[in-house]
Every structure is written in structure tokens, then in C-alpha cells.
Amino acid sequence: MKSKIFKKSTNRNLMIIGVAALFVCLSSCGKSDETPTITEPIPVQDLQPDLPTATVDSSMPGIGEARDISSFELVAEMGVGWNLGNSFDVISKDKTDWGNPLPNKAIIDAVSEMGFKTLRIPVTWEWNQSAIAPYQIELNYLERIKKVVDYGLENQMHVIIDLHHDNEWAKPIPSLAVNVKKRMHSLWTQVATYFKEYNESLIFEVMNEPRIKNIPEEWSGGTLEGRNIINDFLKTSVDAIRATGGNNAKRHLMIPTWAASTSPDAMNGLVIPNNDPKIIVSLHSYFPYLFALEGQGTWGSDQDKADLRAEFDKIRQKWIVEEKRPVILGEWATKKTIAVKNRIEYAAFYAKEATARDLLTILWDDGGDFQLFNRNTLTWTSTEQAETIIENAVK
């Protein structure tokens, strides 16, 4: 079965194997570390897509004027989360192509009933957005996403929507940067306008794991040039959202590092657009990589636990302590090939230690290799694991 995580782990393996030789090659080619940020303004005069606003029921949860609260206050309210992975983010018009049924109310109701409080909806736009200006998004696609957003809000959940598997066009490469920025500006202008009546319960995550695929640094922090361009993409998106006004002027937004990585290069290279006060840092931590993402070996020694604590301490120190920014760990998981007992032990420790450091966790569930909830049968692969996550993610 096709899977985002399978592709990710395969690429990482290739990068690890080839990094030494390719580093020598790149160094000998005179690669410069003095790469300026791409800062050309976006000519938006030709970007005039239709800008519908969703028809809403004003009595529904999540609709109405947004409260002017801090991002720290919002994250404290949100509660442990679950990803609707490999659904809207499928790289195809057919959103069932990776084995999951179309998202429906019964799925979201069951996830909420288990105790998950935040719903992250990964969204790939490429297949439902024109590739040429004005980059119109299909209205029926926005309407389909809205239904699932509403299912979450009706369950009193906070909901996140993002730009997910759009890596084929949203490449941080200088020759493409201006056109990418135009498309991103148009995309987020349309999305923000459509959801304008939704309050702070809806969060926009402007990119997922921005990176250049199949380079040695893909998963280890990227290049200076690439990080600078990504910073420009993030600013473009934030500016587009803020410009639509209304609730979007104070909507809480999530922005990632290069590849949502917790590596020092990635975290130190992130620039918060405009020092915007309502920005949440988005990171992914499948840690340790070989166990969590590859499903190799076991986990639980004193050293394993010390290493995971150090990972969380590093994240907290950088963002919460030094930068005064809240953090959401938007993806973490273990493969279902790992013994259930070991998955439960790891999940309990991960959720508890992250929560103790004010790091909000959102479990990655792709319905496949990392399945915790079977969306076809509406049953939990391991009820005990799900309950363990909920119990340990409460302070």
C-alpha cells in the first residue's frame, strides 16, 4: 500500500547511505554558504481567483468572532491530537487510493469518543487546484474538506488543516521560487477566505514538511539556500492569510522548520514571519528513527528513555524557553509491526514526557503501516494503546 511514511523512510535510508560521498562531491563543486533569502515581492495583480466564503450555521461550534488569545493559551486548550492521514493527502484525485474510506462523520465521532481533542487534517491541494494562474481551487474540494472540519468542531475538537504532499510544485529552488510564491499566495488567500467565518478553533498549518526531495540533506536540516527560500514561502503564506482580514487577522498559524525537522540546522534556520505573535512552531519527531519510523528493534532501556527526554528538552529549550513560542509535535508514531506491548510502553512515555514539557502531541495514523484506528471497520487496532496515549497526555 502506498504510504507517506514508507516513502519518507525509504528516502531517509538512501540519504544516510549516500551522504558521505555526495557531500564530497557537492563541496568540490564550490557550493556557497552565502545564499540570500529570496525576497522579491509577489506580483499579485494577475492573481484573481474566485473567492467564495463557506456557508455556515452561526450556531455551530467554531463559528463566530475569534477570541484574541495567545498561542500559548490556545495550545493549552487544544489537547492531544490524531491525524486523518492518507485521506485528503493522497497524491491522486481518488482519495481512497491509499486504502482508507472517504472521511465521514462516524470516523471523527469515534476518534473524539476515544478522547482525542485535536483533529489534524492533512490536505494535498495539487490534484484539485489549477497549476496556472490564478491557481483556482475546486470549490467542491473545499466543500468536502469543510464537512470534515465541521465534524471535528461538532465534537468540540480543535481542527488543523495544512498544505501536505504538495512537494512536486512547492519546491524551495531559486528558479521556481517566484511562481511557487504566487501559487501559495493564491492558495492560502482562497482557503483563508473560504474559512473566514471560522474562529480560533480552526488552525492553518501553512506547510507540512517543506524540503527538496532526494538530496543528502533532505531529512537532516536542509541547505542554507533551501531554508532561506522556505522562510520566504512561509512569510508569503502568512501575509496572504492575514491580508484577508476578519478572523484571519488573528488566526493561529503553524509553521514548520525544513522538513519539520528537530535538527539544529533546521530549528536555528527558521525565521518567524514578521515576528507574528500568533505563530506556533510545527515539528515532527519520530524518535528514535530506526525504532519509531522503521520498526526495528525494541525500545525501553534507561538509555532509550534518557535519549527521548533529551530530544524533548532540546525542543523545549529552543522554542518555549528561548524563543517564547509554543510547539506542536504534529506527527509521531510507531509502526504496527512492533509488538503491541512495546508500542504501548513507548506511547505512554512519549505522551507523558512531551506533555510534561508543554509539547502538544498529534499521533500520526495513516490507516496502514502506522494504523491505530481502522476506518473501514471503525475499530481500534489497540484500544489499550489509544487509551494510554489519552491518559498520559493529561497534566
Image (cartoon, rainbow, N blue to C red):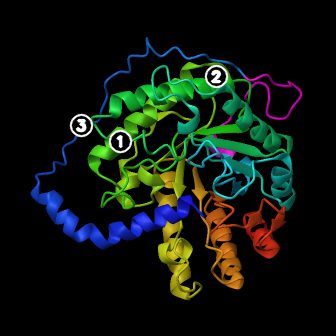
CA gap between label 2 and label 3 equals 32 Å
Name the mark nearer the viewer: 2 or 3.
2
- Residue 61 in the magenta stretch? The answer is yes
For image coordinates 81% across by 51% down, the residue present is 108
Q: Nearer the viewer, mark 3 or mark 1?
A: 1
Question: Which residue is identified by label 1?
Answer: 172
Which quadrant: the C terminus? bottom right
Decide if residue 52 is on the left or right side of residue 148: left
Residue at mark 2: 193
Residue furthest right as drawn: 59
Element under disc 2: helix
Can the viewer see residue 83 in this picture? yes
Cα separation between marks 3 and 1: 13 Å
User: Can residue 73 be seen in this snapshot?
Assistant: no
394 displayed left or right of 244: right
Residue 290: image location, x then y, percent: 48, 76
For the magenta stretch, what is the residue range?
Answer: 54-74
Determine which of the numbered discs, if any, sits on residue 36 in the image.
3
Q: Is residue 120 left or right of residue 107?
A: left
Badge 2 amino acid = Thr
Instruction: Tell me if residue 318 comes above or below residue 349 in the rendering.
Output: above
Within-10-Å neighbours for mark 3: few <14, some 14–19, many 20+: few
As drawn, the residue found furthest toward the bottom would be: 301
Of residues 40 and 390, the one drawn nearer to the viewer in this rendering: 40
